[in-house]
Image: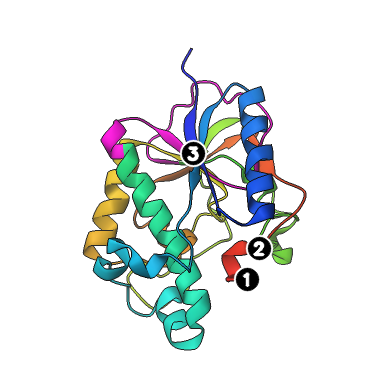
Amino acid sequence: KPLMKGQIVYIKGHAESEKQAQQSLDSFKRNGWDVELIEGITRHTVEDTKEFKELEIIAESRLYNFEKENYNRFLTKVSCAINHVRFWKRVIDEKETLAFLEHDAIGVMDPGDLQFDEYLILNAEYVFKPPSKLNLNQFKNYEWLGFGVNYLPKDYPLKYYRENIWKDSLMVPGTGAYAITPKGAERMLDTVDIFGIDQSDFMLNSYNVNIQYVLPSPVKFNSTNLSTSYGI
């Protein structure tokens, strides 16, 4: 039976990130996933990447604002975005569906052979509750419905709110654990070419890619939230 393949992105030289990444790797291997650790780009290395020099930023976006308001936070968010862009290229190069996992992702079961179209949220049951980085109190009682793979429901609460072409599209609930097909990866790379990038979970929206989720969720969060995406 096919194993779910993927990568766990961590921050090299950050002791807590390295520790969580190892816990993450162990949890996925125990549950029959084929995953590896990948060193992420950080705000300290991002300005040397060719993507940083080449990628445009979509106007009136969260990233666009950060560039003016908080350059340190901006560099951190751009480095996260480039980690995803590189991952989508890998999915296309390898011509297979892969999972993107952040260092605090914990595997709780073998997901089996998941059939979905483009983008699949792997941690839906956990995203609106602590220790999720989203920690959106107003959505903590949100009920996901259905068993297996489902499309986002009509009452899904997270919407893109910036004043550009993506406004009112449905946003992914963070990027802690998702799988993407080559078709989905191709759509996202086209998006980046046409419109530019935004913060990772903002550009991964229903205007750009077809979003589904799976229940029960095969991935949860580590009990400690490092909040490294805030540029700390």
Q: How far across and how far down the image is residue 18, in percent?
A: 63, 48
Circles 2 and 3: CB distance less than 8 Å? no
Element type where label 1 sits in the image: loop
Q: Give me the C-alpha separation between circle 3 and circle 1.
A: 23 Å
Task: Give, as a three-letter code, the residue at label 3.
Answer: Gln
Res. 232 mark: 1
Q: Nearer the viewer, residue 195 or 4?
A: 4
Q: How many numbered marks, from 0 up?
A: 3
Picture quadrant of residue 125: top right
Nearest-to-viewer mark from 1 and 2: 1
Q: Label 1: few (<14), some or many (≥20) within 10 Å? A: few
Q: Residue furthest bottom?
A: 68
Q: Residue at x 42, y 60 (%)?
A: 81
Quadrant (top left, top right, bottom left, bottom right) of the C terminus? bottom right
Furthest-front residue in view?
13
- Kind of residue at badge 2: Ser
| Residue 116 among those drawn in magenta | yes
Q: Nearer the viewer, residue 140 or 78?
A: 78
Q: Which numbered circle lies on residue 227?
A: 2
Q: Find the magenta span and give its range.
A: 92-119
Do tag 3 and tag 1 residues touch (Cβ < 8 Å)?
A: no
Question: How far apart are labels 2 and 3 at the CA level?
Answer: 19 Å
Answer whether labels 1 and 2 touch (C-beta < 8 Å): yes
The residue indicated by pointer 3 is 7
Point out the tag, 2 or 3, that comes first from the N-terminus.
3
Residue at image location 43% in from the left, 87% down from the top: 68
Work out whether 7 lies above or below 147: below
The amino acid type, in three-letter code, at marker 1 is: Ile
Give the secondary structure at mark 3.
Answer: strand
Residue 224 relative to residue 210: left or right: right
Instruction: Classify mark 2: helix, strand or loop.
Output: loop
